[in-house]
Amino acid sequence: MTMSAANTVPKPLISLQQVTMQFGAQRVLHALDVEVQRGQTLGVIGESGCGKTVLLKLIIGLLRPTVGRVIFDGKQLDNLAERELTQQRLRFGFLFQGAALFDSLSVYDNVAFGLRAQGSKPEPEIGEIVRQRLQEVGLPVGVLAKKPAELSGGMKKRVGLARALALDPEVMLYDEPTTGLDPIMTDVINELILQTRRQRPVTSIIVTHEMKTINKVADRVVMLYPLSRLQPGEPQILFDGTPDQLHASADTRVRQFIEGEARDRLQELAAKSDQS
Amino acid sequence: MATVSSAPLGLWRLGRRKITDAILDLGELSLFASRILTGMRRRSSYNTLLPISFSVGVSSIPVVTITGMFIGMVLAVQAYSEFYSLGLATRLGQIINISVVRELGPVLAAVMLAGRVGSAMAAELATMRITEQIDALACLGTNPIHYLGTPRFLACVLLIPLLTIMANFMGVLGGAMICIDVYHVESHHYWENVRGYIGMWDLMTGLIKPIFFGAAIAVICCHRGFYSDAGAEGVGRAATRAFVLSFIAVLVLDFFLAMFLNNLYDYLWPHTRGLF
């Protein structure tokens, strides 16, 4: 009975085990355990500076944890050689906070970049994929020759999404995909995330402050809290559950975050600055 | 009392930390240089070589031309009265041209490269770092050091000898112009003395040194850019430090290369030095 139960539990696609991340003297993540199942859309929320982006960069192997292990599809990423890590990274798509488009390249070259780097497809096929991806994110063919500096914030995000999707990733990582966008464009990006999930069997991790994005696209939510504000011995993950359960959380810090209320934070910040 | 006794200890600790940091920095720089060199085996590292070569080489020609010419002219102005008073005005070309060909031309071209190209390179890469473009390259299956560092290294190493030839030519021309056209030094003897004094060894050593200068400038400037601090201040600091460190590296390398090449000359052709 126990054996069969163990067999039915699917192995997580991504697993962070006791991950601690430190930059010099500053510790950002401490003894973090997170698992993401294949096909799941995980929303990661939390205050600025709590280590959400660092978490994404650990998952894709751009950072190596100070302590702990990052496992992707059974492989320990932080132990892989550079070449193998590069191969694993190609299974991810990453939409950066500022889109991170290459300034010197046109929209076409940006979206085609990963495909060309792979070197497995002829140029006409690459051109076809680029046009298809741009169409998927609702951009006209007219933008192909434009440089990133000529695009609006929302267009940049969509080009970034098209570039990330060009390699047909198994996992999509979104780093604050709607930050700095107007409400309409925010919803457009949310719809594109949903559309991406509908069109391909993709596992997604979305780091965001936008509760609307979480409610609309996430299956599961994890809330991180800054280490400096935790009580001694308290875990860094304050909440792990579905978006519906968020509002029922007994933790006032979780409710305070999702309701976007400062309450006594202003006094707390003032007291902290007085101390320093 | 305690402060008096602890002051030397504090200084010792500070000094030890600075030395340790310097050794660590040098190790990191060497590792970075080795990664740039391994990129030379990858075909993708050569994709951007042409536009970078244009910016490193062709765009530097005007500034190298002007500075080279004026340095030759200044040398002529400074040395003329001394040589004239000794009745050696026709030998002015020897001292001007040997100074230009062996020292001033290579160092001038290197300083111009560090100032015009190196700091811009550091600022560009630092901007790419803070806008996450370098992370985006890694996510798209490209090694950022190979893609960004190797072509810049190759452009600097391959083109600095050509810039040095240009600086040398203009320096020789500038010196001759002042001596012959302004101070009316007899041109036949001026050029004959130069031809008899400056040999292939002088020309070659003047072209070997810049290769080392170019390599040092490229490695230092790319490294500064790649590991820049965040924000506009970080980019500015990266550009400034790139230039300062490159300039120091050029002067230090120049000293050791001059020592080595002079000793090598004395070993190969003993007792053959002399102005007359």
Image (tube, rainbow, N blue to C red):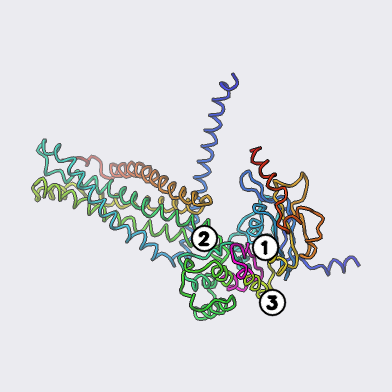
Residue B33 visible? The answer is no
Relative to B114, is A23 on the left or the right? right
Look at label 1 and name its amino acid.
Answer: Glu
**Residue A222 x/y as whole percent:** 74, 60
Relative to A222, is B166 on the left or the right? left
Q: Residue furthest top?
A: B1
* Residue under label 2: B144
* Residue under label 3: A198
Question: Toward the viewer: A234 or A153?
Answer: A153
Relative to B275, is A268 on the left or the right? right
Question: Toward the viewer: B48 or A226?
Answer: A226
**Magenta segment, which residues?**
A163-186
Look at label 3 and name its amino acid.
Answer: Arg
In reply to whether residue A118 is colored magenta, the answer given is no
Determine which of the numbered discs, if any, sits on residue A210 in the image.
1
Q: Chain of mark 3?
A: A
